[in-house]
Amino acid sequence: MSSSTPAFDPANVQGDILVGLLKKSQQYIIFQIDDNVTAFRQKLALLIPLITTTTQVTNDRARIAAHKKAALGQGKAPELLRLSGVNIAFSHAGLVKLGISDDLGDSAFTGGQLKDASDLGDSGSTVNGTFVPNWLPAFKGTIHGLILISGDSELTIAKTRLVIEGIFNFGAHNATLHEVTTLKGTVRPGAEKGHEHFGFLDGISQPAVQGIDTRPNPGQETVRQGIMLCGREGDTVARPAWALDGSFLALRDLFQLVPEFDTFLKQNPITSTGLSQAQGSELLGARLVGRWKSGAPVDLTPMKDDPALGADPLRNNNFRYDFPDDSQTQDRCPFAAHLRKTNPRADLEDPPISAPTESRRIIRRGIQFGPEVTAEEAATGKTNFGRGLIFVAYQSNITNGFQFIQHSWANNLAFPPAKLDAQGDPLSPGSDPLIGQAADVSSRTLLGTDPNNQAQSLPLPMQWVVPKGGEYFFSPSIPALRGTFALHA
Ligand code: N7H
């Protein structure tokens, strides 16, 4: 960031990045730009007024809060306000198609996720010397961009989508883009709202961003704006001026094998502590994730769930794995629990490692897709319907953020480092049980799930999270969309 960098203005930043589009449902339209690039760029100019900025989302949130308060004041249940949001992002191939040749300075983005799949650990096979992941066909072809539409209902989204289809003449002879595929997500129903498909409350721990989240919750670490936004303080890479206030978006289409995961928990209860089978299975699930289904962190409540703690934003993220017994025992939380692998907190930040983790932080958005588990699936323990998480993470540097977390932390059996066994020798905590990947599935094991037998390693017989596609995108600022991407007639 130089002294001539314009002052930060949230109205310049697309709304999903720093505050998150408001959503009960969401569509991700993955598209290719057609050959009349000039016409596409002219149409893009018409889309820009529809793009929801950070300022708009912040105002919408305030409107919702006021609406709820007013309804409750009158003793009524608040109705959902009709709200819709739109954002857009482009892949590297999309920039090339648009004739934008500046180097954005992120090698993962430039290479694209298809090329990265093998390093991420996705399963696949080598055909004529090229690794081909077991992805859906849509993700194996050319992808130029992504339009995100969010809303309070599928109907609201459908209406917004019609407007966007009209702008780009979807499906008509003069269309300027065509749809490769649309991913459709929706939050889970009833009491499962906010919980991902394995049943765990999600979206609790996000970094606070300086100047945006000015009142972080206890335990919520604040990162400099440049960790999320290109060109701001903390972003150390030289980039074109138009990249200012843009962010990289890593998308992953992650299927979850829920009945199979539940069967595994059922078959491996932790009963050494005198718990019943069912309680032992619940404990195993919590220790694999690092939180109980309610969201309560196992570091704070290791042996039993505490729903009030899980629901309390002032307490549910206020831990660092820095209790005196945390650094060398897994009494509270296995070293390789999903949460600890993807944000190790004191494991890296405190001695003996003392390495800052700020540059590894990502903001997670995304949404669930697919139906609830049916009675038949639950009874047979076998998935018949596709369901999972459309995973979306923002950062100013994919190589430091999503890619690093997946490749060097989640998949890396030796991470977190500097943990010792009873003889004082270094131990390997194991694979992230949820998202850790390995070419040889049988190498997926982790230590310490049983607090009374921490040296025992638990084999993970399969991957319950299966990537079926993804891409890296860049979500430009509003001024960049106006000045660099669009053409004004
Ligand atoms: Fe994860 N899950 O259900 O277990 N994740 N995640 N994730 N995840 C988190 O603390 C889940 C995935 C992170 O700050 C929670 O907000 C599932 C990928 C990070 O302490 C739960 C999938 C990557 C955090 C889940 C999945 C990450 C986090 C607790 C795939 C990155 C914050 C909720 C289907 C490569 C850690 C919360 C922190 C939390 C689950 C994917 C990263 C419940 C099911 C691919 C950084």
Image: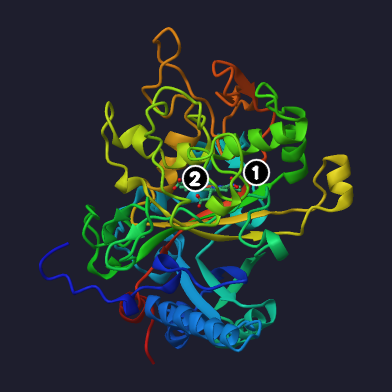
Residue 420 at x, y = what percent? 41, 16
Residue 79 at x, y = what percent? 64, 84
Does residue 486 lie above or below 431 as drawn? below
The residue wearing badge 1 is 466
For the residues carrying marks 2 and 1, which lies nearer the camera in this image? Answer: 1
Badge 2 element = helix
Q: Say whether residue 388 is left or right of residue 398.
A: right
> Residue type at mark 2?
Lys
Q: The N terminus appears in which quarter of the rendering?
A: bottom left
Badge 1 element = strand
Q: Quick one: 39 or 278, which is closer to the camera? A: 278
Residue pictured at 44% horizontal, 35% vertical: 409
Q: What colour-coding does the image apply?
A: rainbow
Q: Quick one: 180 or 272, which is closer to the camera? A: 272
Residue pictured at 61% horizontal, 70% vertical: 27
Residue 479 lies in quadrant: bottom left
Q: Is mark 1 within 8 Å of ligand 1?
A: no
Q: CA distance from mark 2 to mark 1?
A: 17 Å
Does residue 110 lie above or below 382 as drawn? below
Q: The C terminus appears in which quarter of the rendering?
A: bottom left
The residue wearing badge 2 is 115
Q: Residues within 10 Å of mark 2 (few under 14, many from 20)?
A: some
Does residue 312 lie above or below 241 as drawn? above
Q: Quick one: 95 or 474, which is closer to the camera? A: 474
